[in-house]
Image: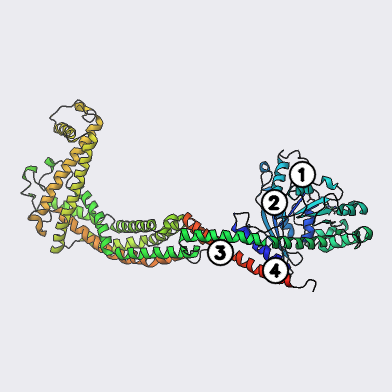
Amino acid sequence: MMILTKKMIEIRNILARVGQSSTLTLPSIVVIGSQSSGKSSVLEAIVGHEFLPKGTNMVTRRPIELTLINTPDSQAEYGEFPELGLGKISDFSSIQRTLTELNQAVPDSQCVSDDPIRLSISSPNVPDLSLIDLPGYIQVVGQNQPLELKQRISELCDKYIQTPNVILAISAADVDLANSTALRASRRVDPRGERTIGVVTKMDLVDPIRGASILSDKQYPLRLGYVGVIPRVPAATGLFKKGNTNLTSTITRNENTFFTSHPLEFGPGSDVQVGTTTLRKKLMHVLEQTMSASLQSTSDAIRQELEEATYEFKVQYNDRPLSAESYLAESLDAFKHSFKQFSEEFGRPQMHELLKNELDQRMLDLLAARYWNKPIHDLGVPIAEPNSLVDLPKADPDSLYWRRQLDASTSALTKLGVGRLATTVVAGSIQSHVDALIGQSTFVNHPFARQAITEAASTILNDRFYSTSDQVENCIKPFKFDIDMEEREWTTGRDHVQGVLKRELTACEGAMKNLETTVGGRRKLKEVINFVDKARKGDVVVEGDYRSGAGGFSAELLAKGREAVFLRDRADIIKMRMLAAKSKQCANIKNKYHCPEVFLDAVASKLASTAVLFLNVELLSEFYYNFPRELDLRLGRHLSDDQVEKFAKEDPKIKKHLEVIRRKELLELVLEKMESLRQLEGLEKDRPRGG
Ligand code: GDP
């Protein structure tokens, strides 16, 4: 008999985890009574410990779902709050404190909350029972209590006393039963008295004859009857209450003394039931009967829920199994795989290109600053007159000036901090590739993982940053003193720089087009350009500063005009330099002073190649080796189950998928347990009673 209830309580708890539908539940015993009726005393007498919140001011504000678990093989007595994760609490006064805090947390404005506190108590001295303690009914609303409190408590109790629950209606013997709020409430939902157990406390406070007549109440007969109890620990033994000692035997002894001293009223000959022990047995019996009666309907409901979950799993998820761990493992594998692919595609040539592009930009800046920084007509010899672009260039090759210009430019290029620049460019590119990989992966929906991966990458890159830039800087050092250039390098530089100039020209022309549209067309821009040109040559006299609103043009328009003039001149120079680079003279390395673009391009290539050799060893290979390991460290085995679960559920789709599976599994588990329970029950029924 015990085994059945135990198993059913187990099932009840699993069902509570499935949640949702109220049909998916097995009955409980719901305890109701007005304040001071002795409700807490009865519950504590059953448990054998003082553990419920005490005090005058509305101590119970939330339902307490109390599961008692009989543990015949262990002496330990302890409570657990499954939702709080506090572990096993063997000090009952600590359980009492926790319950008090949980109740006090309900704000006064809310009065009571229907969010239950779950508490299980394991002990060899408790029966297997599932009880729900509710806030006590109040007669009069206290001064500091909201008016609707009475109503709210009554509503909350009504919610719980519905079928199939058993009602434990507590009344005190010294109050007329006709006035018992608990019995009145139970009569409303159970008018024929079929699932209510009447408990009458404080039997010691009334005359035994009257007490006995209360218990055999004829006015409101209950099929399950009344039990008279004295769940109070006598004052003389009050000392024991302080410790963790079990109260059951003290209470029972006290009750025995009282009831046996009135054998006529309460003795075996009388047909009344008395004592906490009798009450416990009755509760166990009634709960088991009720549970087994609702077994069929509950298992039908579960089967239906399971069918729905199975259908959803099939239709929405194609029966695809999934667990939080497998999801994380698969996501991580997929990510590592995409990283591996990236690592095969990103190597020396790609780094070289990145770096060369960067150096090309620096080279263009240098050329602009040192060679192209004047209006065309002041440029002097190294680039020919605008009208004679063909016979380029006319600079005196022996002129010390042009030698110094090139030497200074070269030196500026080699000394611009290539080590740091190269490392920054490559590290930045790796990081943004990693970001792009995250963006294409399932991790994109997981802020936690996204951060972990980004940090994994930046940690490695930061770790290697300084030593890599130092190494690279060291190995390009020789170029700062001397550059030894071969014919082949020159030729490559000459080809390459034409492309660079061409792109620069395209950029200039693009910017010019943009300007045209912003000022309202090519013609308009031309007018402004003409004006700016004339003003610069002094052909038009501009009052004051021609920059502000002269010639009928707005200041803004003039600024655009100056920008256009700059772009036009820059484009002219670039066109000229492209011709120069293409010219016969620039085909020969000996004419390098005429062809600074070609020379600097070749130098930039040398710098890039050398830097890439070391970047490859110091940064890229290191990164490729360490990154997957760092990922394992941050997203791998050492994450706790909770973290993995939390991670997986960040994605709403995955969350739903996991929940359907979990629901299905729980329902299957419950059904399986119920099946075996029914077999057990069958066996019980066949067994001859009292054997
Ligand atoms: P609750 O408000 O319904 O939980 O009532 P309590 O269990 O706190 O009991 C109210 C008061 O009645 C307490 O002082 C108890 O000690 C006392 N009490 C409870 N049961 C009995 C009993 O059977 N006899 C006597 N004399 N006092 C009782």
Q: Are marks 2 and 4 in contact (CB under 8 Å)?
A: no
Q: Position of residue 131 (x, y in %)?
A: 72, 57
Is 666 on the left or on the right of 423, as rendered? Answer: right
Secondary structure type for disc 2: helix
Secondary structure type for disc 1: loop
Image quadrant where residue 429 sits: bottom left
Is 414 on the left or on the right of 163, as rendered? Answer: left
Residue ID for mark 1: 138
Image quadrant where residue 307 sits: bottom right
Q: Give neighbour class at mark 3: few <14, some 14-19, many 20+ (Cα, 10 Å).
A: some
State how far apart marks 1 and 2 are (Cα): 17 Å
Please state which of residues 335 and 591 is positioned toward the viewer in this rendering: 335
Identify residue type, mark 3: Glu
Residue ID for mark 2: 160
Identify residue type, mark 1: Ile
State how far apart marks 2 and 3 are (Cα): 28 Å
Identify residue type, mark 2: Tyr
Which callout, 3 or 1, points at the residue further toward the start of the chain?
Answer: 1
Q: Position of residue 283 (x, y in %)?
A: 77, 60
Secondary structure type for disc 3: helix
Secondary structure type for disc 4: helix
Q: Nearer the viewer, mark 2 or mark 4?
A: 4
Quadrant holding the C terminus: bottom right
Q: Position of residue 21 (x, y in %)?
A: 60, 54
